[in-house]
Amino acid sequence: MRIRHTGLATGVWLAVFYLTLLPFVAHGVGMIGIGLSEDAAQQSYLFADDQFVGNAAMLVHILAGTLLVVLVPLQLLKGLRLEYNRLHRAMGTGLVALALITGLAGMTYIPLRGTIGGPVMSAAFFLYGLCLFTAALMVARMALARDRAGHWAWGLRLFWLALGSWLYRLHYTLWYLLTGGLGSEPDFSGPFDLVQNFAFFVPYLLVVQVWVSNRRNAHHGTLATNP
Ligand code: HEM
């Protein structure tokens, strides 16, 4: 019964997640179309004339990042993980590669082109890229070392970081619905924008940290009482 409830809740979450993801994916596909067109720089500030590396980095970034967000929730599904271990490994390898590429391409773009929000946004997004890159490396390292607890902890971090780009837009959408955009400016210089530069990944990493520590302490407690 419990399993059925959990399965239903997971199904509802996935359905809501993929529905909210539709406009995001459509936007990503649209931006790739613009990036590949002849007059990309006229259509979006993300692309510039005569800047092959920056433009290519942004194109690769959007493509890998969109695939990453679409696929990452499937990796956490318990049924798939336990019953189809080879699929979990194959998808995991692909997700690690996508996360490394997304992070690297973003970190290549930032020094070349900066960001629309200026230095604070550039620094925050670069830090986000570093976190994603590190989590991807660590989750693979822990899997290869057969460290299950470590793989689980880094897997959770990678999951929330991979969703970061979606969370960033989700925060903005909810905030605009609730307040009409209080403290947010078109050039991303408002107080809400400054907080958002970090609020889409730092709090989530902190919650994961507390969660992981609690689980570890509970596990040690069990070991202490049941030698
Ligand atoms: C994890 C999945 C990610 C997805 C799906 C994603 C997707 C996107 C998309 C669609 C854009 C274009 C935005 C627009 O049209 O205005 C973009 C821009 C950008 N992304 Fe990502 N991204 C991801 C992760 C990251 C990471 C890890 C970094 C940090 C290295 C990063 C840095 C940037 C930067 C600097 C821009 C340009 C910002 C601007 O000036 O407007 N992204 N990303």
Image (cartoon, helix red, strand yellow):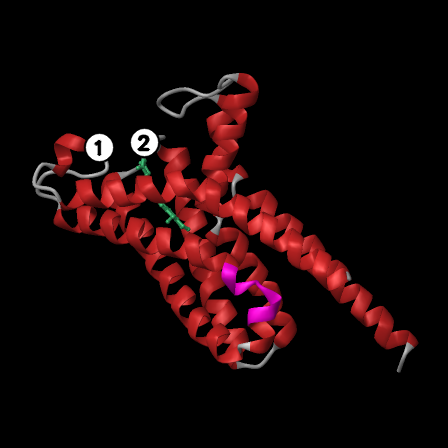
- Residue 96 in percent (x, y) is at 42, 66
From the Cβ of disc 2, is ligand 1 less than 8 Å away?
A: yes
Q: Position of residue 1 (x, y in %)?
A: 77, 62
Q: Circle 1 sits in a helix, a strand or a loop, which is it?
A: loop
Q: Which SS does the magenta portion mostly show?
A: helix
Observer-side mark, 2 or 1, equals 1
Q: Is mark 1 within 8 Å of ligand 1?
A: yes
Using the image, tell me which numbered label, if any, was put on residue 45: 1
For label 2, the residue is 116
Q: Amino acid at mark 1?
A: Tyr
Was residue 78 drawn as part of the magenta stretch in this picture? yes
Q: Is residue 198 above or below residue 62?
A: above
- Looking at the rendered structure, the kind of residue marked 2 is Ile
**Residue 86 place in picture, x, y as percent:** 48, 80
Q: Earlier along the polypeptide chain: callout 2 or callout 1?
A: 1
Q: Are marks 2 and 1 in contact (CB under 8 Å)?
A: yes
